[in-house]
Image (spheres, rainbow, N blue to C red):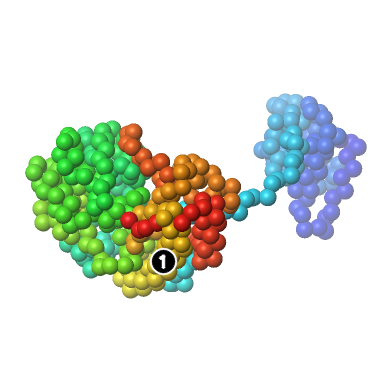
Amino acid sequence: MNELTLVLDNAGSTPLYEQIYQYIKNEIKSGKIECKTKLPSARSLARHLQVSRSTVDMAYTQLISEGYIESVPCKGYYVCEISLLYDINMPKKSTKVHRTKPVEEKLIDFTPNGIDLEYFPFGMWRKISRSILNEERKELFDSGDSKGDINLRRNICNYLFEARNVHCTPDNIIIGAGNDYLMTLLCRLMNRTRVIAMESPTYQRAYQVFRANDKSIVTVNVEKDGIDVESIRMTDADMVYVMPSHQYPLGTVMSIRKRNQLLKWANEKDFRYIIEDDYDSEFRYHGKPIPALMGIDNTDKVIYIGTFSKSIAPAIRMSYMVLPEQLMNLYEEKISFYSQTVSRIDQAVVSEFIENGSFERHLNKMRSIYREKHDLVISNLKEMGDLISIYGANAGLHIVIKVNNGMTEKELIDRARAAGIKVYPLSEYYIDGMEKEKNAVIMGFAKLNHSEIQKGISILKEIWKGNGGII
């Protein structure tokens, strides 16, 4: 180190110790100072550079902390083996063969998932969020009630009464981070229930949650006006999971006759319950609004689950469950120790969003936007004539079409994909070997604009060839 050529810049902005540290570090990394080389003592280096001893000590301490040198008692400072050190500033040599990245294929994606976020009320959301944080409400940073904040539960209660004819109290509502969490909580609560009846096809995530919680699933056919209630009677099920306002994925609306039959089935035995998943009931475009199943239940047999994923945004991850009195008492007794899974700040924002009327205005706007898209999809598809049959029209954010051209589901999807269009298989929603539609696909429209919808369906018309009716 007597040949050290470092010239310190005493007038520069970089501290002297850092100049020494950087110089020695770079010399080690470049191999000019080899592994196991002994460095001069802090005293001799300070004398050589005409700086204070503490300046050199600081540089050596930094080099030791990063693994470039080590201090050996009674011997001095030595350079370490640095081949295994990671340096975020040093570019790594790549052993990969670089190939030209292909241009990503731009598809017109008729996904049934997601919503149109172009019209999300960012301004109001930001205003509410800022207002809540400016108030310095310290309680929002505490854990809070396991069922969720009372103001939000009260506002949900009022909304359900006005929009869905559901009569409940805030005490019967539980807030949770998504439907999956609430259904898992329900499985813990209903541990004496082993068998659950489900429609097939159905919402696969619900099926997976129930199976993951050791529930046996019996499948029941979906008829034109809803689940086959008589088939449920032939099973050992004590609980049934349904989506009466807009069955997923078929879009079937359960008739009042079937709803009464289902309530009668639940009433025939103690501890029988119906899970009503009302995931997108806000979006009905033609005909009279359909009340929730819980809205006509006078026997306290319906467990209602709703979500803000479709009506506000999926990323909010906020759902709510209304429990019958008997189950809420059981919840308080058995599993109320579960912590609340939704941020209290998010709860406060959503609560104010509902209370100040923003939620209603946003729903009205999105219902109008989705109605236009829905009607555009239907009118364009009808041009295919007898080639197709349309299922689940007039509500929701997707439809199912059956294509009568002799192609299988896979052939329909593959041919569409080759033409730059993405549609989805209905078959993936069937469970337990139930007979599947062999030529039907799912088409969502929420995330597409008008020109994409028209272009996409125009291409499908050409590649599938042919000339349905709406079922």
Name the foreground residue: 171 vs 337. 171
Name the foreground residue: 128 vs 306. 306
Secondary structure beneath label 1? helix
In the drawing, does residue 260 fall left or right of residue 7?
left
Picture residue at 54% right of the left edge, 44% below the top: 414
Q: Which amino acid does label 1 sit on?
A: Asp
In the drawing, does residue 339 fall left or right of residue 426?
left
Would residue 353 be visible to someone looking at this image? no
Picture residue at 15% right of the left edge, 59% below the top: 296
| Residue 86 higher or lower than 384, as above or below | above
Would residue 100 be visible to someone looking at this image? yes
Report x, y in % for residue 163.
Answer: 25, 66
Report x, y in % for residue 291.
Answer: 22, 62
Q: In which quarter of the image is the N terminus?
A: top right
Q: Quadrant of the C terminus?
A: bottom left
In the drawing, does residue 295 fall left or right of residue 99?
left
According to the picture, the residue beneath numbered tag 1 turns out to be 375
Report x, y in % for residue 13.
Answer: 77, 58
What is the number of callouts on the image?
Answer: 1
Report x, y in % for residue 453.
Answer: 50, 62
Picture residue at 62% right of the left edge, 50% below the top: 105
Q: Residues within 10 Å of mark 1 (few under 14, many from 20)?
A: some
Q: Quadrant of residue 319?
A: bottom left
Q: In which quarter of the image is residue 398?
A: bottom left
Name the foreground residue: 337 vs 412. 412
| Residue 153 higher or lower than 337, as above or below | below
Name the foreground residue: 57 vs 399. 399
Picture residue at 84% right of the left edge, 50% below the top: 8
